[in-house]
Amino acid sequence: MSSIEIFTWGYWGWGTETPKLVQAVDAVENARGFDAPVFVDVRISRSVRAPGFREKAFEKLLGPDRYLWLPRLGNDAILDGGGPIHINDPAAAADLLDLAQQNASRNRRVIFFCSCAEPAGCHRKTVADLVLTAAMRRRLGVVLDEWPGGVPRTHEIRLSKESIAQRLKGRVSFPLSRVSDLAAIAALPWGSAVKVTAPGEFTYFTSGPAFLVKGKWALPVSEGLFGTAEEALAAGAQIRASRGYGQRTGPG
């Protein structure tokens, strides 16, 4: 068997949009040739403010075949009021690896998640280390990546009427007027360069996978504006390093 790819992820910003989230993730995996993935919840507690991830809400949306709560891989510090990351039961990483192996044989992959917006400083990165250690003991090839994974690339958007300044006002997100290929924008790797062209002008910004702003799809504007794809990708590389994005591999 080739290496098993496992994804980490944080649901920050998706608390009221879980049906659209699942639609986007499933579209990406389908376009990649995989069946709909399994979500593994590695939070120590599900008593949260985000309605789509509170208690059993996400479990009910996905169903028992696509959701598993694994609090043994949660961070005890959350319950203790803060402090250093402390995984409740590090040995449970073997259970997560078992699940990934079982689902690989069914042509579907695992996404394990918590709430944090970025991997850097998050306990899911510690869990990823434990999974790699468990894979090493089994001499099993494993690839761990933050969802949606992949190598940063360029993506182009053309404006026919609006100016770039009109669409990029605020520079926090770039709203998409229409989405013809949800899988393509939902799978845009973190640190990618998006080129925006309008009559007589163009610019680049550093971006990542699409998300929802007031119910409409948009691309994050992770940095300022650039004149070339190379500049935007270089800024993206710095973002990836500082936020903990990137692929890690185990033996295989």
Image: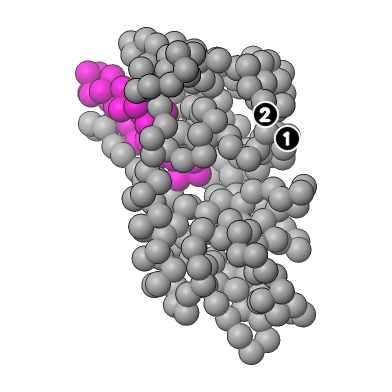
Inspect this view and state whether residue 127 appears: no
State the SS at label 1: loop
Mark 2 Cα-neighbour bin, 10 Å: few <14, some 14–19, many ≥20: some
Residue 92 lies left or right of residue 107; in this view the side is left
Q: Residue at x 68, y 86 (%)?
A: 199
Residue 196 to residue 144: above or below: below
Q: Can you tell which mark lies on residue 50? A: 2
Q: CA distance from mark 2 to mark 1?
A: 7 Å
Residue 138 lies left or right of residue 16; in this view the side is left
Does the magenta run of residues contain 141? yes
State the SS at label 2: loop
- Looking at the image, tell me whether mark 2 or mark 1 is earlier in sequence order: 1
Mark 1 Cα-neighbour bin, 10 Å: few <14, some 14–19, many ≥20: some
Q: Residue at x 44, y 68 (%)?
A: 232
* Percent position of residue 18, x then y: 70, 33
Please state which amino acid type lies under the numbered disc 1.
Answer: Thr
- Is the C terminus in the top left, top right, bottom left or bottom right quadrant? top left
Location of residue 146 (image quadrant): top left
Residue 121 to residue 212: above or below: above
Residue 108 lies left or right of residue 24; in this view the side is left
Please state which amino acid type lies under the numbered disc 2.
Answer: Ala
Labels 2 and 1 touching (C-beta < 8 A):
yes
Q: Can you tell which mark lies on residue 203? A: none
* Percent position of residue 39, x then y: 56, 25
Q: Which residues are magenta?
A: 124-149
Q: What residue is disc 1 on?
A: 16
* Percent position of residue 7, x then y: 45, 34
Residue farthest to the bottom, as pictured:
200
